[in-house]
Amino acid sequence: MGITKTDMYTDDQNKFASLLKVLGHPARIAILQYIINQEKCICNDLVEELGLAQATISQHLKELKSIGIIQGSIEGKSVCYCIEEKVWNQFQEEFNAFFNQAVKVNHQCC
Amino acid sequence: MGITKTDMYTDDQNKFASLLKVLGHPARIAILQYIINQEKCICNDLVEELGLAQATISQHLKELKSIGIIQGSIEGKSVCYCIEEKVWNQFQEEFNAFFNQAVKVNHQCC
DNA sequence: AATTAATATCGTAATATTGCAATATAAAAT
DNA sequence: ATTTTATATTGCAATATTACGATATTAATT
């Protein structure tokens, strides 16, 4: 059906999965890495760098903005995008919290 | 078009994004957390716990197996699933490597 | 004011994902 | 041998995602 039954999971599970989903596209990973390496960039830089259409890049940027991991500020006729470090670090903590769950448990496996 | 242009990204970017994509569904997060808490489980446990159809759970387990994060071994007429700790820890390292990229750079933002 | 430049949004086609019923498979129990 | 139990697979309908061309929108430049 293509529709995820979000009501049967906890808010934390839904939120965490949403994060992972947004990050789960190579274009968006590439965009983040490009911004990191260049400190900041504008949409057109990414169009040239990644070889995707401008509309496509703009869409990916929108999704990344939606989880707060990047921030865009208007600079003349272009928009300067950069990493929102507070959110970036918060995500890293969330990821580690998730992965560390398993450590607490004695895994005696099949 | 719905098709991701994987050829324009590095192998690392594609692989990392695939991981994130598989983890980016609340059912799969819930499954992993259930397995962690119970140490191990069988498919039917998850059907009862999550309220999804057996076929759906089986599919999600298949995707989790595809990235190696869980392992299933046949025990009589059921299959015992558990976390593959080596892979789990490896993923955690990959995630941290990704997030630590940003730390190396001086972010002077817009 | 008209043009240029950069980005966002809309509409759409192609493909992918999610979820389930029905069916297949395989091992244990009767 | 048949039935029961647990899981996997197949086929399908509904929805979501990806990508792009076309078209706004908005600010700078001429």
Image (cartoon, coloured by chain):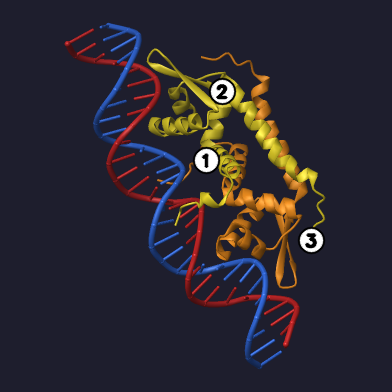
Chain colours: A orange, B yellow, C blue, D red
Residue A64, percent from left and from top: 64, 53
Decide if residue A68 is in sight here: no
Q: Which residue is mark 2?
A: B83
Please, what is the three-letter code of the amino acid marked with disc 3?
Cys
Q: Nearer the viewer, residue B45 or B69?
A: B69
Q: Chain of mark 2?
A: B
Instruction: Name the element at disc 3.
Output: loop
Q: Which residue is mark 1?
A: A7
Please, what is the three-letter code of the amino acid marked with disc 2?
Ile
Please, what is the three-letter code of the amino acid marked with disc 1?
Asp
Task: Point out the frontmost of discs 2 and 1.
Answer: 2
Residues at circles 2 and 1 in contact by the CB criterion of under 8 Å: no
Q: Chain of mark 1?
A: A
Badge 2: how crowded within 10 Å, few (<14), some, or many (20+)?
A: many
Looking at the image, tell me whether mark 2 or mark 3 is earlier in sequence order: 2
Instruction: Name the element at disc 1.
Output: helix
Residue A89, percent from left and from top: 75, 42
- Determine whether B56 is above or below A110 in the image: below
Badge 1: how crowded within 10 Å, few (<14), some, or many (20+)?
A: few
Q: Which residue is mark 3?
A: B110
